[in-house]
Image (cartoon, rainbow, N blue to C red):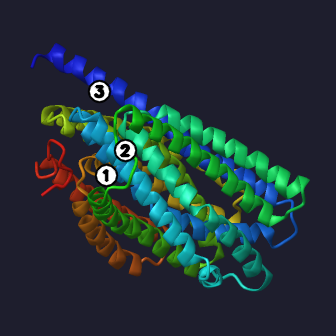
Amino acid sequence: MSLTSRTGRGRAHDREILRLAIPAFGALVAEPLFLLTDSVIVGHLPDPALGALGVASAALSALVGLCVFLAYATTAAVARRLGAGDVRQAMRQGMDGLWLAAIIGLAVGVACWPLAPFIVHLFGAVGQLATEAVTYLRISLIGIPAMLLVLAGTGVLRGMQDTRTPLVVSVASFALNGLLNAWFVLGLGWGLAGSAWGTVLAQALAAAAYLVMVVRAARAHGASLLPDLAGLRAAGAAGLALVVRTACLQAVLLVAAGIATRMGDEQIAAHTIATRIWTFLAFALDAIAIAGQAITGRALGAGDTSGTRAATRRMLIWGVACGVVFGALVLAARPLVPALFDARGEAAAELLAVLWPVALLQPVAGVVFVLDGVLIGAGDQRYLAHAGLWTTLAFLPFAAVAGTLVALWLALGAWMAARLVTLGVRAYGTAWMVTGTSRTAT
């Protein structure tokens, strides 16, 4: 291939990556911004309403976070069928994802309802704080099926190479959530329960929007709307592996937070701020990973291995470039960050020190997140589950001997390096590049 041809193909990949990644980034950023509005509204209520919201939201986020596979696995499955030219079966895969989301949502809601007091106590809530947290959590559990349907519906549209519609639905639903919260909490005086009901209703309407869009598309292409047992089993198997992967990621972050908490109040304060900065920057890198899921699944479905390699290289370039820029921005903003978060004294000093590893790890994160998305798009979930276990084991010894917050973040750096190696070695090989409609790597 000539230099001109390679350059033209690279630019085409760039346009496609940006077309998918920019709306995905908007959707990712919309959620924390609008959820911040909930905190502001609930902040007008007497104590311990805000603390109860924090406890219940953390528990709910953990439950929903483990089910993010409904978006990822559905994206990969739908994109692969789309690439193979079988739109009808692509929509059939999408319907399987929606049915699986509904089944899991109902099961989680029913199972967790009686366990709500135990769950909030795991987060250290007692007394009135626990009582209000249980109320919020139980109301929110009613909306769990809708939340998971939103994940699956998002995955279907991403698999169809559409990230703009999920952005529109996200912004609309989170804006509605804010309005309903203000009305129920401040207008009608429902208190913390009003905030929960506002979120449930907004999520239900978002789920309804996705259901209408996916069902219409399925009917238009002649796909059955009924559940398919074989399809549900395949989606469940892929999902189980991604649950292991996600649980490993959450375990590392929880262990790190626990260690920072034991170091002292200043250390956990600095760690919390550093984690928030890391998480916000991860949204942009996750957007490229989401583009990677959609592009990789479609390319492998079409049997285009050379196109898959070329797109992966371009996404890695974008990942590294974004990582370098983000790292530089963190270092440039570093002297201003403590005042921005009202960190003072020892907490400010700890934060200034820990921002160095946060910044230096950004290029590594850029590669890791992109490769993670590419392998998810390829349907390489079993490898990702095994890699998640091994990289978690690699993190624990470094975390165990971390005596300072900087050492703890260096342990997180060792974890990211382990992920870089395991994902990089896999991506360099060919075992994950399964073409056609099969989505299970060897």
What is the x, y in percent for residue 91? 35, 41
Q: Is residue 239 left or right of residue 105?
A: left
Callout 1 secondary element: helix
The amino acid at mark 2 is: Ala
x and y percentages locating residue 159 in the rendered image: 36, 40
Is there CB contact under 8 Å for labels 3 and 2? no
Decide: marks 3, 1 in contact (CB < 8 A)? Answer: no
Q: From the image, tell me which residue sits under label 2.
A: 289
**Cα distance, mark 2 to mark 1?**
7 Å
Quadrant in the picture for residue 240: bottom left
Q: CA distance from mark 3 to mark 1?
A: 18 Å
Mark found first going from the N terminus, 3 or 1: 3
Disc 3: which residue: 13
The answer to whether the residues at label 2 and label 1 have Cβ atoms under 8 Å apart is yes
| Front position in the image: 173 or 271 | 173
**Where 410 falls versus 356 (above or below)?**
below
User: How far is disc 3 from disc 2 in space, using C-alphas?
Assistant: 14 Å
* For marks 3 and 2 on the same chain, the one whose residue lies earlier in the sequence: 3
- Which circle marks residue 209 in the picture? none
| Three-letter code, disc 3 | His
Badge 3 density bin: few <14, some 14–19, many ≥20, Cα 10 Å: many
Q: Residue at x 46, y 64 (%)?
A: 103
- Between residue 302 and residue 261, name the one nearer to us: 302
Element marked by disc 3: helix
- Position of the N terminus by quadrant: top left
* Residue name at image x 73 percent, y 73 percent: 135
Q: Mark 1: which amino acid?
A: Asp
**Residue 213 appears at what percent x and percent y?**
50, 37
Residue identifier under label 1: 372
Disc 1 crowd rating (10 Å Cα; few below 14, some 14-19, many 20+) is many
